[in-house]
Image (cartoon, rainbow, N blue to C red):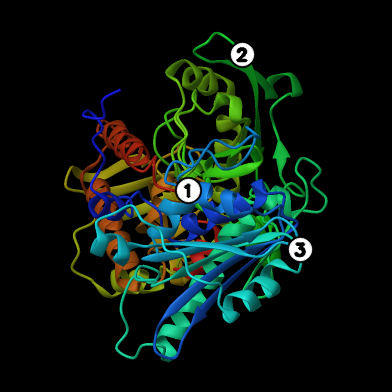
Amino acid sequence: MSNELINEPDAPRLINGLRDTGYDFRTASADIIDNSVAAGAQEINVRIDLMQDGRKFVYFGDDGSGMNADGVFKAMRYGAPERENPESLGKFGLGLKTASSSVCRQFTLISRNSPDEALSKLSWDLDHVEASGLWEMSREPVTVDEEEAFEELCGEGSGTLVVWSKCDRILSKNYDEPGGAKEKAAIGRLSAGLQKHVSEIYHRFLDQADTRERNITISVDGVKVGPWDPFFRERSEQVLAEKQQAMEVQVEDGSTHNASVAAWILPHSDDLDDDEKSQARITNRGQGFYIYREGRLISSGGWLSVFGGLDPHMSLLRIEFDFGHELDEAFHIDVKKSRVLFDPALSEYLEKLLGPARREANLRYRKKAQKAAAKAKVDHTSSNRTVEGTKNTRQATVEGADPDTQSAVISNNRGPKIKIRQKIENNVEPGSLYIEAVDTITSGDLWEPSYRSAGVEGHVGAVLLNKHHDYYQKIYLRAASSGYSVQGMDLLLWAFTAAEQNNTNEELDPIFSDIREEISSNLRKLLRDVTTPTSDDLEDE
């Protein structure tokens, strides 16, 4: 057969182009760890070294089944042969190569499949490929340092060591003093970030009490990584009935395979102590789907194509979704195993299935947040002082006020001695005579006009603010630390109230009431997607 149609890719251009497949340091590291898990490793060790001259090395060692020389050669091939075990976390035969080259310009694979066998070693050096123009690996003897690293990180039996060198993309910036204090601190943050990532991605494998997956140990820079369960099961509630959790998904060949779904509503952060808050990690970005393939978390947070974007009132809801390798094609798993796409029919099914859980999570969040907000205090003292000290404002004159009938006789722009129904209060605290936030307004309006007195006579026009209205809870409370902002809103609403009282009569009073109701309703709609601040939010403010 003629080879005239064989058209091999340009080695330097392609091998460099494959560096940009969307990995970052953490996702690239996880892809290497996937290979260790697939090799049956019990212990996996990661080490990040920063040399005094700024050179950086990353080592991944495991005590898995390892490979002989032929196995190492095949594993280093771009598009390595498919693994015999279809459940393997590895999938496309590209992960080792594309993940490694996304971070470094040289990566080395060292392995053996028995303690009596010599170590086999091969490397890809992008600089060598560029110079030669060939898909040619490098074969160098195993160095003493590499032997020591293998023994330290893999043990004395079978295992595999991956070494990243010429790490030009491990950090997002270059430092003026390579290997100096600032770069060391950056490597420390990198290590801590990887520990956090690993604790989430492999939490089922790391949790000794979780029997769904076999247990393994992963250490990063000598720190044994503990599991982080996104669902905080000890305090959360699973709200889907057992019969709703199992589902069948049909693939293109007509066969069906099982998947499972669970809906967890976490407790509100106001009900957690500091330690529990650090475990739950309740944030707006944490809501949504947590997708597992063969027990490994591949996607965390967000609503994919099932619902719209992030909703601040959904921050307590997390969905646990599990599937096996049989559904890889159905869910369009990418090379990095970090993306999943739902078929439109499945999205529609999940939307109906999870609708009640979303409503319940929304209700619980709002109720708790509203209670916390209602207890919070905003200082209106300076606003009251400003109104008290400004004598030339235009407002109605109170001729008399009767708290028993909740009515007042006033003189205003509409004429003298006009009798209107109005909230009348006696013996009010002088410091809150003109402006006060209350929890007794049941109309749903943001504010109500009132006539108040520090004694039993000499009533003055006042405005009462509704503590339960969204505007007060979502805007006022967030502005509480800014006296000018609170005072500005206070004086605006007091001025509205004074204008109403100075221009109302028995005929116009219902019209002003309708205007307050319409403004209050519009404000509530405008603020629907603004989250009610929690106690933590208010403390931060």
Disc 1 residue type (three-letter) = Gly
Which residue matches tag 2? 256
- Under mark 3, the amino acid is Pro
Quadrant of the drawing holding the N terminus: top left
Note whether residue 274 is visible.
Answer: yes
x, y percentage for residue 84?
A: 64, 34
Helix, strand or loop at mark 2 = strand
Residue 291, above or below 122: above
N-terminal of the pair, mark 2 or mark 1, is: 1
Relative to 173, is 393 above or below? Answer: above
Q: Nearer the viewer, mark 3 or mark 1?
A: 3
Could you tell me how far apart the alpha carbons at marks 3 and 1 are, in whole angstroms?
A: 26 Å
How would you rate the neighbour count of disc 2 (Cα within 10 Å): few for under 14, some for 14-19, many for 20 or more? some
What amino acid does circle 2 point to? Thr
**Quarter location, residue 121:** bottom right
Q: In this orientation, which residue lies closer to the viewer: 231 or 1?
A: 1
Residue 95's disc number: 1
In the picture, measured across the screen, residue 460 lies left or right of residue 224, that is left
Q: Which of marks 3 and 2 is nearer the N terminus?
A: 3
Q: How far apart are marks 3 and 2 (CA)?
A: 43 Å
- Which label was assigned to residue 115? 3
Residue at point 31% right, 37% down? 522
Label 1: element kind: helix
| Residue furthest front as drawn | 1
How far apart are labels 2 and 1 at the CA level? 28 Å
